Image: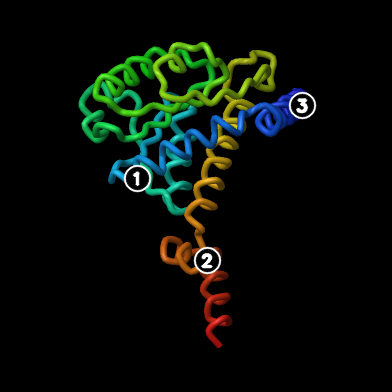
Amino acid sequence: MLKEYKESAQLAINSVISNVNDSDLKKTVHEILGCELQNGRIHLTGIGKPSYVAAYGASLLSSTGTPAYYLDGTEAVHGSSGQVAENDVVIAISNSGETKEMIATLQVLKNNHAKIITISSNASSSMAKLSTHAITVKVVREGDDLNKPPRASILAQMMVIQELSILLQEEKQLDAQTYLKWHPAGSIGEHLSKKSESCIY
């Protein structure tokens, strides 16, 4: 079974590299940059395992120059959608694109005039149809006999978020000095701090 997972993970990674449409990524970046120009905010959301991808994505984007917020996909229909203002961008993550709670959340957000980006494996899914833009990454096998617990699909979703973060980082010309302001602690902060000091002298 471990061999099957490794093969499935490799297929998922190759799918992102080969099949994710660069124009969809660039459209998303354009939406995010436009939102920020209007003092809007970026939110990431998901249900179940993709919710952890959303939280990771919000943290990664924030640390690389694009302030982003995690939106609890279930709590959103119980009042938390109030954190999303008109014309804010919401990135919603789901492998199937048919998660009922997520569909309900996106309907509320769309009614409140948020711009919605979905990341899923189905370009014709209910979530995709509610979206301003849909990023599609097809994952056939999760990597075990059940083919249900999210494994390979999670890798693919994370890679899409990472690609978006790189494109945004390039657009904003993030440098080490600025990154150090947001990440002063840990081995990364220590390394950047020493590098900065050596440049001064």
Q: Residues within 10 Å of mark 3 (few under 14, many from 20)?
A: some
Helix, strand or loop under label 1 = helix
Helix, strand or loop under label 3 = helix
Q: Residues within 10 Å of mark 1 (few under 14, many from 20)?
A: some
Q: Amino acid at mark 3?
A: Glu
Residue 25: x percent and y percent?
Answer: 54, 34
Q: What residue occupies the far bottom of the structure in this picture?
A: 201
Task: Tell me how far mark 2 sits from mark 3, CA to CA.
Answer: 36 Å
Q: Determine which quarter of the picture holds residue 115.
A: top left
Q: Is residue 140 above or below residue 12?
A: above
Q: Is residue 184 above or below residue 50?
A: below
Q: Which mark is residue 36?
A: 1
Q: Which mark is residue 176?
A: 2
Give the labeled residue for mark 3.
7
Whether residue 131 sits left or right of residue 79 in the image: it is: right
Residue 103: x percent and y percent?
Answer: 37, 15
Task: Tell me how far mark 1 sits from mark 2, CA to CA.
Answer: 22 Å
Helix, strand or loop under label 2 = helix
Q: Determine which quarter of the picture holds residue 99.
A: top left
